[in-house]
């Protein structure tokens, strides 16, 4: 039986943070196939996203950017009916005197 010596452990300990970071990035970036929703649900979600994005650009006269996508995901706007999202944006735009940024 081989004994593990301190000299064998130290190089591995130095690599642990790098291994942990790579492992976490793989988990965050590449979800497993089993965790993806059915295709119909994805299509519906894509349609919702595209409708909200188009309405946002039309109402605010701003281009949609990466930050807008992050906010869309973080606030789970995809779970709010499209009509309500668009109605809320139109209401805010009507009540705002200046251009929305």
Image (cartoon, rainbow, N blue to C red):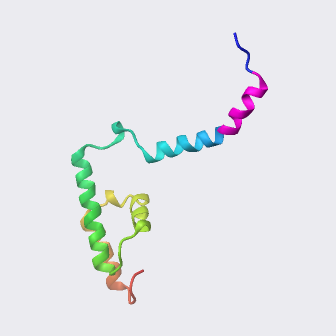
Front one among 63 and 38: 63
Question: Toward which corner of the image does residue 71 lie, by quadrant?
Answer: bottom left
- x and y percentages locating residue 33 in the rendered image: 34, 38
Q: Quadrant of the N terminus?
A: top right
- x and y percentages locating residue 66 in the rendered image: 42, 66
Q: Quadrant of the C terminus?
A: bottom left
Question: Toward which corner of the image does residue 99 lie, by quadrant?
Answer: bottom left
Farthest top residue? 1
Q: Is residue 49 above or below residue 60?
A: above
Q: Is residue 8 above or below residue 3?
A: below
- x and y percentages locating residue 94 in the rendered image: 32, 84
Mostly what secondary structure, the magenta segment? helix
Q: Is residue 84 above or below residue 12?
A: below
Front one among 3 and 61: 3
Identity of the residue drawn at 32% across and 81% down: 61
In this image, 40 relative to 71: left or right? left
Q: Residue 16 magenta-drawn?
A: no
- x and y percentages locating residue 52 in the rendered image: 29, 67
In this image, 18 relative to 86: left or right? right
Identity of the residue drawn at 23% across and 45% down: 39
Q: Is residue 22 above or below residue 58?
A: above
Farthest right residue? 6
The residue stretch that appears in magenta = 5-15
In this image, 21 relative to 90: left or right? right
Please state the total of marks drawn on the protein image: 0
Question: Toward which corner of the image does residue 9 lie, by quadrant?
Answer: top right
Front one among 75 and 19: 19
Farthest left residue? 40
Front one among 23 and 48: 23
């Amino acid at each position: 039986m081989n004994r593990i010596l301190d000299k064998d452990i130290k190089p591995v300990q130095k690599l642990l943070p790098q291994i942990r970071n790579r492992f976490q990035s793989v988990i965050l970036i590449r979800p497993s196939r089993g965790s993806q929703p059915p295709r119909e649900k994805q299509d519906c979600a894509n349609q919702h996203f595209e409708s909200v994005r188009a309405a946002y650009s039309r109402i605010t006269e701003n281009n949609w950017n990466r930050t807008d996508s992050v906010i869309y995901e973080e606030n789970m706007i995809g779970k709010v009916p499209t009509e309500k999202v668009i109605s809320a944006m139109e209401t805010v735009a009507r009540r705002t005197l200046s251009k929305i940024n």
